[in-house]
Image: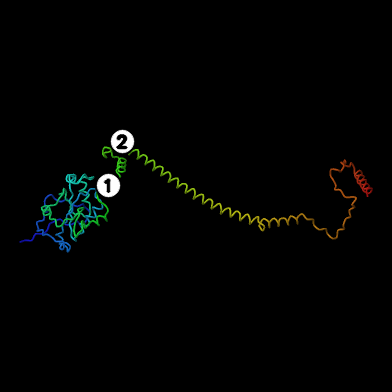
Amino acid sequence: MEELEHTCPLPRTTLIEPAIFTPETSCECRAPHEKLTVELARLGTPVDRPVRIYADGIFDLFHSGHARALMQAKNLFPNAYLIVGVCSDELTHKYKGFTVMTEDERYEALRHCRYVDEVLRDAPWTLTQEFLEKHKIDFVAHDDIPYSSAGSEDVYKHIKEAEGISTSDLITRIVRDYDVYARRNLQRGYTAKELNVSYINEKKYRLQNQVDRMKEKVRTVEEKSKHFVYRVEEKSHDLIQKWEEKSREFIGNFLELFGPDGTWKQMFQERSGRMIQAFSPRGSPSSSPPRDFSPSRSPSPPSRWAMPRTSPPSSPKGASASISSMSEGDEDEK
């Protein structure tokens, strides 16, 4: 009998394309699909016979907690092929409640997770043996369902608590901060009807948005003012420092010039000495006889204004006569 080769899809080796969707028919691989044990799966399987792991859930608002759970499922065995089932909107709304994302959005979110090899749409709410055989599933990975073992209610409880995130937590945050999200989406252009917001709340949110914008403007002006004041203080400090340096330099130069031993005093003394020498009378020669001056008669300096005006002599005789008369007059005075 000829041995059939496995034609099951292989795990993704590249991430250039999203994961495939599970075909509506069963797995087309006709090779016998023996049930694997955990020990055999951990030892490793042939390349053409990956370990098919199934995980299901709602995956609303796909977040890092979902991704970590799928990463753990993917890394359970060396050659693992992860199939993720996503429940439809009809089943989810019936058994759990309304979702934020539609089923198509949730399908696409799972397809672009790097740990997912295949996405099964409209997954069943409860698993049956027929379903597992149809898709040749070896192991089922639990997501949010408590797994009791070894006397513990949930062996994954400490891991879930360490992750600290779940869809319920996100929904709680949205409900708690509903006003903030509604105001944000109104500001982005959504209508009040699309957000299911009443007319009064719409006006209230828009008024709050205007108040926030005014606060932001005031905050911006305050920041700019602080920056301006800081620059002015910095410039003032520089100017004061430069003024102090210049004033010290000026005072030093002033003292050097006009101080007790300054340059100006030395120059003044030198010039004063020169002026005294210039104005002091020169000594008389030793050969010239001294003149005696009578204290009763002091010579008066001649004055050109006191001299009588005489007419010019008409003849040489007149000139000699005037000269002789002046000589006689001088003799009389003597």
Amino acid type, residue under disc 1 in the picture: Thr
Report, in whole angstroms, how far the alpha carbon at label 2 lies from the one at label 1.
24 Å
What residue did someone put label 1 on?
Answer: 172
Quadrant that contains the N terminus: bottom left
Please state the horizontal and vertical placement of residue 116, each as a whole percent of the image.
20, 54
Residue under label 2: 200
Q: Residue furthest top?
A: 199
Number of numbered discs: 2
Horizontal placement of 223 versus 35: left or right?
A: right
Tell me what residue is drawn at x 27 percent, y 47 percent: 172
Amino acid type indicated by mark 2? Ile
Foreground of the two, 108 or 304: 108
Circle 2 crowding by C-alpha within 10 Å: few under 14, some 14–19, many from 20:
few
Mark 1 surroundings within 10 Å by alpha-carbon count, few (fewer than 14), some (14 through 19), many (20 or more): few
Q: Secondary structure at mark 2?
A: helix
Which quadrant of the structure image shows residue 312? top right
Is 313 or 265 nearer to us in this picture? 265
Asked if the residues shown at circle 2 and circle 1 are in contact, with their CB atoms under 8 angstroms apart, the answer is: no
In terms of depth relative to the viewer, which is nearer, 167 or 83?
A: 167
Picture coordinates of residue 59 (x, y %)? 21, 49
Q: Is residue 255 above or below residue 211?
A: below
